Protein backbone atom coordinates (compact mmCIF):
# COMPACT_ATOMS: atom_id res chain seq x y z
CA UNK A 1 0.00 0.00 0.00
CA UNK A 2 1.25 3.46 -0.88
CA UNK A 3 2.01 5.91 1.94
CA UNK A 4 -0.59 8.37 0.64
CA UNK A 5 -3.30 5.70 0.69
CA UNK A 6 -2.31 4.63 4.19
CA UNK A 7 -2.41 8.24 5.39
CA UNK A 8 -5.82 8.77 3.79
CA UNK A 9 -7.18 5.63 5.42
CA UNK A 10 -5.88 6.70 8.83
CA UNK A 11 -7.44 10.13 8.45
CA UNK A 12 -10.79 8.57 7.50
CA UNK A 13 -10.63 6.32 10.55
CA UNK A 14 -9.87 9.28 12.84
CA UNK A 15 -12.77 11.24 11.35
CA UNK A 16 -15.16 8.38 11.97
CA UNK A 17 -13.92 8.05 15.55
CA UNK A 18 -14.47 11.78 16.07
CA UNK A 19 -18.01 11.53 14.71
CA UNK A 20 -18.68 8.56 16.99
CA UNK A 21 -17.48 10.46 20.07
CA UNK A 22 -19.61 13.47 19.11
CA UNK A 23 -22.72 11.32 18.71
CA UNK A 24 -22.15 9.69 22.09
CA UNK A 25 -21.73 13.07 23.76
CA UNK A 26 -24.89 14.39 22.09
CA UNK A 27 -26.94 11.37 23.19
CA UNK A 28 -25.59 11.65 26.73
CA UNK A 29 -26.40 15.36 26.91
CA UNK A 30 -29.91 14.81 25.62
CA UNK A 31 -30.50 12.06 28.15
CA UNK A 32 -29.17 14.29 30.96
CA UNK A 33 -31.41 17.23 29.99
CA UNK A 34 -34.43 14.93 29.67
CA UNK A 35 -33.73 13.49 33.11
CA UNK A 36 -33.51 16.95 34.64
CA UNK A 37 -36.84 18.02 33.15
CA UNK A 38 -38.51 14.78 34.18
CA UNK A 39 -37.34 15.04 37.82
CA UNK A 40 -37.70 18.82 38.30
CA UNK A 41 -40.70 19.61 40.56
CA UNK A 42 -43.37 22.02 39.30
CA UNK A 43 -42.97 25.72 40.07
CA UNK A 44 -45.15 27.39 42.69
CA UNK A 45 -45.48 28.34 46.38
CA UNK A 46 -45.67 25.40 48.78
CA UNK A 47 -45.80 27.44 52.03
CA UNK A 48 -47.93 29.22 53.06
CA UNK A 49 -50.85 27.45 51.37
CA UNK A 50 -54.37 28.66 50.57
CA UNK A 51 -56.48 29.72 53.60
CA UNK A 52 -53.42 29.81 55.90
CA UNK A 53 -53.17 32.08 58.98
CA UNK A 54 -49.82 33.89 59.35
CA UNK A 55 -48.19 36.27 61.84
CA UNK A 56 -44.89 38.14 61.92
CA UNK A 57 -42.15 37.18 59.44
CA UNK A 58 -43.52 34.66 56.92
CA UNK A 59 -40.96 32.42 55.16
CA UNK A 60 -42.26 31.81 51.62
CA UNK A 61 -41.20 28.34 50.43
CA UNK A 62 -41.48 26.92 46.92
CA UNK A 63 -39.85 26.31 43.52
CA UNK A 64 -38.94 28.85 40.82
CA UNK A 65 -37.05 27.41 37.84
CA UNK A 66 -37.26 27.00 34.04
CA UNK A 67 -34.98 25.70 31.26
CA UNK A 68 -34.75 29.30 29.97
CA UNK A 69 -34.77 30.86 33.48
CA UNK A 70 -33.92 34.55 33.93
CA UNK A 71 -35.37 35.67 37.28
CA UNK A 72 -38.31 35.36 39.68
CA UNK A 73 -40.29 37.97 41.66
CA UNK A 74 -42.77 37.85 44.56
CA UNK A 75 -45.75 40.15 45.25
CA UNK A 76 -48.62 40.47 47.74
CA UNK A 77 -52.02 42.13 47.43
CA UNK A 78 -55.24 42.41 49.47
CA UNK A 79 -57.89 39.97 48.30
CA UNK A 80 -60.31 42.82 47.54
CA UNK A 81 -57.96 44.50 45.01
CA UNK A 82 -55.29 43.80 42.40
CA UNK A 83 -52.77 46.39 43.65
CA UNK A 84 -49.68 44.17 43.83
CA UNK A 85 -46.80 45.21 46.10
CA UNK A 86 -43.27 43.93 45.46
CA UNK A 87 -41.70 41.73 48.18
CA UNK A 88 -37.94 41.70 48.85
CA UNK A 89 -35.78 41.87 45.73
CA UNK A 90 -35.36 40.37 42.24
CA UNK A 91 -33.77 36.90 42.35
CA UNK A 92 -31.73 35.71 39.35
CA UNK A 93 -30.91 32.27 40.78
CA UNK A 94 -33.43 29.43 40.39
CA UNK A 95 -34.75 27.79 43.58
CA UNK A 96 -36.04 24.23 43.99
CA UNK A 97 -38.02 23.36 47.17
CA UNK A 98 -36.34 26.05 49.27
CA UNK A 99 -37.05 29.50 50.70
CA UNK A 100 -38.02 32.03 48.04
CA UNK A 101 -38.38 35.18 50.16
CA UNK A 102 -39.47 36.50 53.60
CA UNK A 103 -42.69 38.53 53.87
CA UNK A 104 -42.95 40.77 56.96
CA UNK A 105 -46.70 40.72 57.56
CA UNK A 106 -46.42 43.21 60.44
CA UNK A 107 -46.14 46.01 57.85
CA UNK A 108 -49.73 45.47 56.65
CA UNK A 109 -53.08 45.63 58.48
CA UNK A 110 -54.76 42.41 59.52
CA UNK A 111 -56.96 40.90 56.84
CA UNK A 112 -57.08 38.56 53.84
CA UNK A 113 -54.23 38.70 51.30
CA UNK A 114 -52.89 36.81 48.29
CA UNK A 115 -49.34 36.05 47.08
CA UNK A 116 -48.03 35.91 43.51
CA UNK A 117 -44.86 34.23 42.22
CA UNK A 118 -43.68 35.32 38.74
CA UNK A 119 -40.99 33.23 36.97
CA UNK A 120 -39.54 35.27 34.05
CA UNK A 121 -37.79 33.66 31.07
CA UNK A 122 -34.97 35.19 29.01
CA UNK A 123 -37.32 36.02 26.15
CA UNK A 124 -39.40 38.27 28.46
CA UNK A 125 -42.35 35.89 28.87
CA UNK A 126 -43.25 34.63 32.34
CA UNK A 127 -45.39 32.19 34.31
CA UNK A 128 -47.37 33.18 37.44
CA UNK A 129 -48.47 31.15 40.48
CA UNK A 130 -50.89 32.32 43.21
CA UNK A 131 -51.80 31.56 46.82
CA UNK A 132 -55.20 32.90 47.93
CA UNK A 133 -57.01 33.83 51.17
CA UNK A 134 -54.00 34.20 53.50
CA UNK A 135 -55.20 35.64 56.82
CA UNK A 136 -52.79 38.05 58.54
CA UNK A 137 -53.55 38.11 62.29
CA UNK A 138 -50.93 40.12 64.19
CA UNK A 139 -53.26 42.09 66.52
CA UNK A 140 -53.95 40.36 69.83
CA UNK A 141 -57.52 40.57 71.27
CA UNK A 142 -58.00 43.15 74.08
CA UNK A 143 -58.77 41.63 77.46
CA UNK A 144 -62.04 42.85 79.08
CA UNK A 145 -61.52 44.07 82.70
CA UNK A 146 -63.53 42.13 85.31
CA UNK A 147 -65.61 44.30 87.70
CA UNK A 148 -65.09 43.61 91.41
CA UNK A 149 -68.16 42.47 93.34
CA UNK A 150 -69.53 44.90 95.97
CA UNK A 151 -69.50 43.30 99.45
CA UNK A 152 -72.99 42.82 100.95
CA UNK A 153 -73.38 44.06 104.58
CA UNK A 154 -74.00 41.29 107.10
CA UNK A 155 -77.00 41.42 109.45
CA UNK A 156 -76.50 40.87 113.15
CA UNK A 157 -78.75 38.13 114.52
CA UNK A 158 -80.96 39.11 117.48
CA UNK A 159 -80.92 36.52 120.30
CA UNK A 160 -84.36 34.93 120.97
CA UNK A 161 -85.70 33.78 124.30
CA UNK A 162 -85.96 30.00 124.75
CA UNK A 163 -89.47 28.63 124.08
CA UNK A 164 -90.74 25.57 125.97
CA UNK A 165 -90.98 22.54 123.69
CA UNK A 166 -94.05 20.26 123.87
CA UNK A 167 -93.26 16.68 122.82
CA UNK A 168 -96.14 14.60 121.46
CA UNK A 169 -95.41 10.88 121.07
CA UNK A 170 -96.91 9.24 117.97
CA UNK A 171 -97.10 5.53 117.17
CA UNK A 172 -94.33 4.20 114.96
CA UNK A 173 -95.60 2.63 111.69
CA UNK A 174 -93.56 0.09 109.70
CA UNK A 175 -91.90 1.63 106.67
CA UNK A 176 -92.70 -0.05 103.36
CA UNK A 177 -89.65 -1.17 101.45
CA UNK A 178 -89.84 -0.17 97.78
CA UNK A 179 -89.35 -2.98 95.27
CA UNK A 180 -85.91 -3.17 93.71
CA UNK A 181 -85.51 -1.31 90.44
CA UNK A 182 -84.46 -3.43 87.51
CA UNK A 183 -82.18 -1.51 85.24
CA UNK A 184 -82.54 -2.21 81.57
CA UNK A 185 -79.34 -3.05 79.64
CA UNK A 186 -78.00 -0.15 77.72
CA UNK A 187 -78.11 -0.48 74.01
CA UNK A 188 -74.71 -0.70 72.43
CA UNK A 189 -74.36 1.12 69.18
CA UNK A 190 -72.26 -0.52 66.62
CA UNK A 191 -70.14 1.84 64.66
CA UNK A 192 -69.36 0.76 61.17
CA UNK A 193 -65.83 1.74 60.19
CA UNK A 194 -65.59 2.84 56.66
CA UNK A 195 -62.26 2.47 55.00
CA UNK A 196 -61.57 5.49 52.82
CA UNK A 197 -60.94 4.65 49.24
CA UNK A 198 -57.36 5.43 48.22
CA UNK A 199 -57.15 8.39 45.88
CA UNK A 200 -56.68 7.48 42.28
CA UNK A 201 -53.17 8.09 41.13
CA UNK A 202 -52.87 10.87 38.58
CA UNK A 203 -50.83 10.26 35.46
CA UNK A 204 -48.43 13.07 34.59
CA UNK A 205 -48.67 13.89 30.87
CA UNK A 206 -45.44 15.88 31.07
CA UNK A 207 -43.61 12.92 32.68
CA UNK A 208 -44.84 10.53 29.94
CA UNK A 209 -43.77 12.91 27.17
CA UNK A 210 -40.32 13.40 28.75
CA UNK A 211 -39.89 9.63 29.13
CA UNK A 212 -40.92 9.10 25.48
CA UNK A 213 -38.43 11.74 24.27
CA UNK A 214 -35.67 10.23 26.40
CA UNK A 215 -36.38 6.71 25.09
CA UNK A 216 -36.49 7.87 21.47
CA UNK A 217 -33.21 9.76 21.78
CA UNK A 218 -31.49 6.81 23.46
CA UNK A 219 -32.74 4.35 20.79
CA UNK A 220 -31.60 6.65 17.96
CA UNK A 221 -28.16 7.07 19.52
CA UNK A 222 -27.72 3.32 19.98
CA UNK A 223 -28.75 2.66 16.37
CA UNK A 224 -26.28 5.27 15.10
CA UNK A 225 -23.55 3.76 17.31
CA UNK A 226 -24.13 0.29 15.83
CA UNK A 227 -23.89 1.68 12.26
CA UNK A 228 -20.65 3.51 13.01
CA UNK A 229 -19.08 0.44 14.65
CA UNK A 230 -19.99 -1.63 11.55
CA UNK A 231 -18.34 0.96 9.28
CA UNK A 232 -15.22 0.97 11.45
CA UNK A 233 -14.98 -2.80 11.26
CA UNK A 234 -15.21 -2.71 7.46
CA UNK A 235 -12.51 -0.05 7.27
CA UNK A 236 -10.20 -1.98 9.58
CA UNK A 237 -10.73 -5.18 7.54
CA UNK A 238 -9.95 -3.27 4.33
CA UNK A 239 -6.82 -1.83 5.89
CA UNK A 240 -5.62 -5.23 7.07
CA UNK A 241 -6.28 -6.84 3.67
CA UNK A 242 -4.29 -4.16 1.86
CA UNK A 243 -1.42 -4.43 4.33
Image: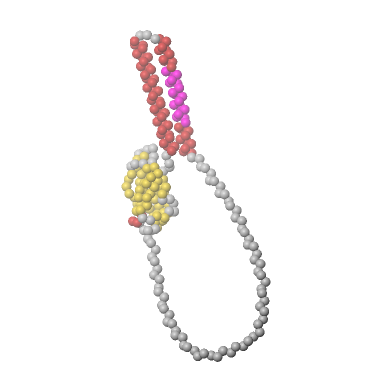
Tell me the quarter of the picture where residue 94 sits.
Answer: top left
How many labels were placed on the picture? Answer: 0
Left or right, residue 87 beside residue 41: left
Q: Residue at x 41, y 43 (%)?
A: 43
Looking at the image, can residue 128 be seen?
no
Q: Nearer the viewer, residue 236 or 164?
A: 164
Left or right, residue 4 beside residue 213: left
Q: Is residue 180 above or below residue 29?
A: below
- Please provide the residue range marked out in magenta: 215-232
Quadrant (top left/top right/bottom left/bottom right) for the C terminus: top left
Q: Residue at x 38, y 21 (%)?
A: 17
Q: Residue at x 47, y 88 (%)?
A: 159
Left or right, residue 185 beside residue 20: right
Magenta span has 11? no
- x, y percentage for residue 237? 43, 13
Q: Is residue 191 above or below residue 20?
A: below
Tell me the quarter of the picture where residue 141 sits.
Answer: bottom left
Q: Is residue 225 above or below residue 33?
A: above
- x, y percentage for residue 100? 36, 46
Q: Residue at x 65, y 82 (%)?
A: 172
User: What's the coloring here?
Assistant: secondary structure
- x, y percentage for residue 120? 36, 42
Tell me the quarter of the picture where residue 16 sits.
Answer: top left
Q: Nearer the viewer, residue 190 or 61?
A: 190
Q: Is residue 238 above or below residue 224?
A: above
Amino acid sequence: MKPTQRTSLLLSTQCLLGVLVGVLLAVGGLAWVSGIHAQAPPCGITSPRDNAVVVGAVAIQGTATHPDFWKYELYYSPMASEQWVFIGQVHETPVINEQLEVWYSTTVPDGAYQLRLRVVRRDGNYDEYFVRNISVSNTLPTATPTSEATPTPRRTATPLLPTPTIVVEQPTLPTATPPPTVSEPAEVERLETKTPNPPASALSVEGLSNAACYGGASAGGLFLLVVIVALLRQLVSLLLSQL
